[in-house]
Image (cartoon, grey):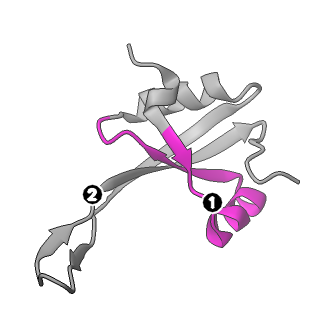
Amino acid sequence: MRDHHDVIIKPVISEKTYNQAEVLDTYTFIVDPSASKPEISDAIEAIFDGVKVKKVRTMVRKGKTVRNRRSNTKSKRSDTKRAIVTLSEGSIELYGS
C-alpha cells in the first residue's frame, strides 16, 4: 500500500477553489495519476484529522502543447489528475486565516 502523501501531491490554490471551500465545503487537490477514488478518500482522512469525506470526483487535465520559439519544435506539458473532495464533517485549513 502506498503512503498517503504519495497519493495527494498538492492542493490547488486559486480564487475559484477558495470560494468553493468557503461556500460548498469542497477542496481541490492534484493527485497521483494512478490513484483511485477510495485511495484519495482514505489519504485525505488520514492526512487531515477530524475530516470525513462525503464524495470524491476526479478529472484528468490534458497537458498543453507548447512551441519553442528558437528551434520551432513542439513539446507537451504533462497531464495532471485532479480530485475535487467534498467533506461531510470537519474542515481543512489550507489558506491560513
- What number is the disc on residue 58? none
Q: Which residue is mark 2?
A: 78
Q: How many marks?
A: 2
Residue at 37 percent across and 39 percent down: it is 32
From the viewer's perspective, tell me whether residue 12 is left or right of residue 36: right
From the viewer's perspective, tell me whether residue 43 is left or right of residue 58: right
Above or below for 84 versus 72: above
From the viewer's perspective, tell me whether residue 73 is left or right of residue 16: left
Q: Dot 2: what SS?
A: loop
Q: Quadrant of residue 54?
A: top right
Residue at 70 percent across and 39 percent down: it is 88
What is the spatial separation of the Cα atoms under label 1 and label 2, in whole angstroms?
A: 19 Å
Above or below for 93 versus 66: above
Residue at 67 percent across and 42 percent down: it is 87
> In the displayed image of the protein, which residue is found farthest to the front?
70
Above or below for 33 versus 41: below
Q: Position of residue 85 (x, y in %)?
A: 57, 46
Q: Nearer the viewer, residue 53 or 34?
A: 34
Q: Which quarter of the rendering shows the C terminus?
A: bottom right
Q: Dot 1: what SS?
A: loop
Q: Position of residue 51 (x, y in %)?
A: 72, 31
> In the displayed image of the protein, which residue is found farthest to the top?
1
Q: Which residue is mark 1?
A: 13
Q: Residues within 10 Å of mark 1 (few under 14, many from 20)?
A: few
Circle 1: residue type:
Ile
Residue at 31 percent across and 42 percent down: it is 33
Q: Quadrant of residue 59?
A: bottom left
Q: Position of residue 40 (x, y in %)?
A: 47, 33
Circle 2: residue type:
Ser
Which stretch did the figure color magenta?
Answer: 9-34
